[in-house]
Image: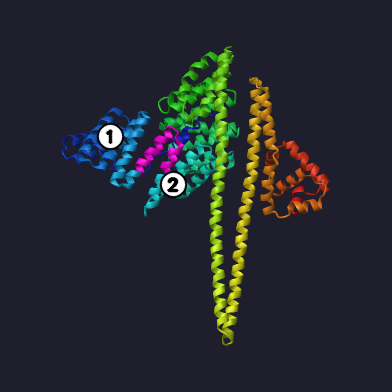
């Protein structure tokens, strides 16, 4: 179970620089004294703002007092900028005390006032607040909406710091990663890195890219991003980021099952966090070490680590507190202390019942089902196991749907880009043809008296014709490249479809053992089998394939007349340089099945052991 995944995404959502007044530039005593003697409302508003920011660090009651007083003063002036800043302060106060809805309402009010004032800088700050509030409650579509609003403001300004661009693109990358849309996450993360001007900005973006690549299973690339981020963090002595990136590295090593390096990274993160008082990263490091201890069957060590992690997270993040409690319960279950596990899970489950935490909620139900089973309470165990299955299936279906939607979005984007490129090529081609035609008319109209000039034009026309031919070739190459993308996308879709259907079929078999629905189960499996063997999908694939590799099937059958239709399909996939795993998914056969199919094909093609099947197929 992954116990600390969410924290490193949350802390990346840092506020962008905002053009408000300088904060905490005077000692608090001096500020309070000035505030009591000032009589001009606009001056008092500025002082109240600075006092609020001072108290927001550790005295929330005093912070609330001066935020309310600032709002009263701002309402007297009816100045939308002052009102917006007052609402924004109240929003930040409510966010600190975990009143999410109130914080969101004040952020909206601040946005409306800044719109009235036509103040772009403060409006960007309000949008930043809104996207962070929506992120807190896992409303990712709203986060992306306000990211796009930020981008519209940035695009409309002639001058804007690239750090703002870097921040917004980084947030989009984080959101896409949380939605499981890793390709879009990676695309926005790389774009964010290009805009990052200083080492501090680069650290956060590189760390995010590292986590995305780790989620995609690209561990080598993930380690490269994180190691570069760690190098930069050490260079500018950013201890919080050093601890954070060390946790990221440890998590990647943990996924790779390199437990020694994972332990080294987590312990280093813990050391830095303890020394510098970074509670968030200390709690994360302890949670990760709890997970590592369970992986190494050190369950008592896991209890100690999860317990301290939970104590720290209780003051910081309810979701991460609940995740740590679930880890602690898991350690008790492993030690067969089932009765002791139940209270932790009873406390964790209500905290995880929101759309952004379903992945962790299912783990809590699973652990409680295990505990009830160990306590010989089968009815309660079955109840929680069913809830686990419901959430697990929901997450599975949502994940697959998002992957297919992401593939479609990427495909549509590439198609539009290709159409634009093709149109530009066609326009250039028409311009060149028109130019050649115009020159030929001028040359012909000149008569014999202009023969020398005609020859000159003839030479120029020849050169124009050469250029025209080049454009024609470029057009054909563009079309071919696009068709290759269509072909690959279609093949991947076939693979993804069969993979999803196979997993659904397995779930149906599991369901059969629990519920007495034999007839419905058999119908479902037969439907899936029929869909997996559906020839219509292959007909579409063949059309795409023949558009790229013209007459491949015809030439293959002429050379090797004994090959079957299924072997011809195998040859087409080999021609596309697909791996055995991809071929198995597309043909709906096992790895051993792919191996046997290759052997049969080699035999029919009469290849010697020294001959390469791939090279022979590629040559057709």
Most prominent secondary structure in the magenta stretch? helix
Tell me if residue 382 comes above or below residue 576 in the rendering. above
Q: What SS does tag 1 mark? A: helix
Labels 1 and 2: the sequence-earlier one? 1
Residue 145: say if magenta: yes
Packing grade of label 1 (10 A; few <14, some 14-19, many >=20) is: many
Colouring rule applied to residues? rainbow
* Horizontal side, residue 258 vs residue 143: left or right: right
What residue do we see at 68% from left, 43% from top? Answer: 536
* Horizontal side, residue 141 vs residue 222: left or right: left
What residue do we see at 28% from left, 45% from top? Answer: 117
Tell me if residue 106 comes above or below residue 168 in the rendering. above
* Horizontal side, residue 152 vs residue 335: left or right: left
The image's mark for residue 52 is 1
Residue 32: say if magenta: no
Give 247 or 163, whichever is nearer the viewer. Answer: 163
What residue do we see at 59% from left, 26% from top? Answer: 295
Mark 2 — residue?
A: 166
- The picture places residue 529, in percent across and down from the top left corner, at 69, 34
**Residue 319 in which image quadrant:** top left
- The picture places residue 515, in percent across and down from the top left corner, at 63, 20
Tell me if residue 298 comes above or below residue 501 in the rendering. above
What residue do we see at 33% from left, 46% from top? Answer: 121
Q: Residue 600, can we see it?
A: yes
CA separation, marks 1 and 2?
Answer: 29 Å
Tell me the quarter of the image containing the C terminus.
bottom right
Packing grade of label 2 (10 A; few <14, some 14-19, many >=20) is: many
Q: Which residues are magenta?
A: 124-147
Q: What SS does tag 2 mark? A: helix
Residue sitting farthest toward the bottom: 449
Give 27 or 385, whichever is nearer the viewer. Answer: 385
């Amino acid at each position: 179970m992954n116990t600390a995944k969410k924290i490193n995404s949350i802390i990346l959502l840092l506020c962008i620089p905002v053009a408000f007044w300088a904060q905490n530039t005077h000692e608090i005593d001096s500020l309070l004294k000035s505030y009591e003697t000032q009589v001009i409302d606009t001056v008092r508003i500025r002082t109240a703002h600075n006092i609020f920011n001072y108290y927001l660090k550790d005295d929330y009651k005093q912070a609330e007092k001066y935020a309310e007083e600032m709002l009263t003063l701002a309402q007297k002036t009816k100045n939308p900028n002052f009102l917006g800043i007052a609402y924004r302060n109240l929003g930040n106060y409510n966010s600190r005390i975990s009143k999410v809805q109130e914080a969101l309402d004040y952020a909206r009010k601040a946005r409306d006032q800044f719109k009235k004032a036509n103040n772009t800088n403060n409006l960007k700050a309000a949008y930043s607040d809104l996207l962070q509030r929506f992120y807190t409650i896992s409303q990712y579509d709203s986060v992306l909406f306000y990211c796009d609003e930020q981008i519209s403001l940035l695009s409309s300004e002639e001058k804007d710091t690239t750090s703002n661009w870097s921040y917004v693109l980084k947030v989009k990358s984080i959101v896409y990663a949380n939605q499981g849309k890793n390709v879009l996450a990676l695309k926005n993360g790389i774009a964010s890195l290009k805009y990052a001007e200083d080492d501090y900005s680069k650290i956060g973006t590189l760390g995010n890219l590292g986590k995305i690549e780790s989620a995609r299973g690209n561990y080598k690339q993930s380690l490269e991003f994180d190691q570069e981020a760690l190098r930069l963090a050490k260079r500018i002595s950013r201890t919080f980021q050093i601890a954070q990136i060390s946790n990221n590295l440890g998590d990647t090593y943990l996924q790779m099952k390199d437990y020694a390096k994972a332990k080294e990274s987590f312990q280093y993160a813990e050391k830095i966090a303890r020394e510098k008082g970074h509670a968030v990263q200390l709690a994360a490091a302890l949670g990760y070490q709890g997970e590592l201890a369970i992986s190494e069957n050190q369950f008592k060590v896991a209890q100690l680590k999860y317990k301290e992690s939970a104590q720290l997270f209780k003051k910081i993040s309810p979701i991460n507190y609940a995740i740590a409690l679930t880890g602690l319960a898991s350690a008790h279950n492993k030690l067969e202390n089932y009765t002791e596990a139940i209270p932790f899970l009873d406390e964790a489950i209500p905290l995880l019942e929101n759309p952004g935490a379903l992945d962790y909620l299912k783990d809590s139900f699973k652990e409680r089902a295990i505990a009830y089973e160990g306590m010989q309470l089968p009815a309660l165990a079955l109840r929680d196991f069913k809830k686990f299955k419901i959430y697990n299936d929901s997450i599975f279906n949502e994940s697959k749907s998002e992957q297919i939607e992401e593939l479609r979005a990427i495909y549509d984007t590439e198609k539009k880009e290709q159409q634009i490129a093709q149109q530009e090529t066609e326009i250039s081609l028409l311009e060149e043809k028109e130019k050649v035609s115009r020159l030929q008319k001028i040359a012909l109209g000149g008569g014999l008296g202009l023969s020398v000039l005609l020859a000159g034009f003839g030479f120029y026309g020849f050169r124009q014709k050469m250029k025209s031919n080049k454009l024609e070739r470029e057009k054909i190459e563009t079309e071919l490249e696009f068709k290759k993308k269509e072909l690959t996308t279609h093949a991947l879709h076939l693979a993804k479809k069969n993979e999803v259907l196979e997993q659904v079929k397995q779930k149906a078999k599991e369901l059969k053992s629990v519920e007495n629905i034999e007839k419905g189960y058999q119908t479902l499996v037969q439907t899936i089998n029929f869909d997996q063997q559906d020839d219509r999908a292959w007909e579409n694939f063949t059309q795409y394939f023949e558009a790229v590799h013209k007459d491949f099937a015809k030439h293959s059958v002429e050379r090797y007349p004994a090959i079957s239709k299924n072997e011809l399909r195998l040859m087409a996939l080999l021609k596309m340089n697909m791996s055995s795993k991809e071929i198995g998914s597309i043909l709906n056969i096992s790895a051993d099945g792919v191996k046997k199919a290759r052997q049969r094909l080699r035999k029919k093609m009469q290849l010697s052991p020294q001959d390469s099947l791939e090279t022979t197929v590629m040559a057709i």
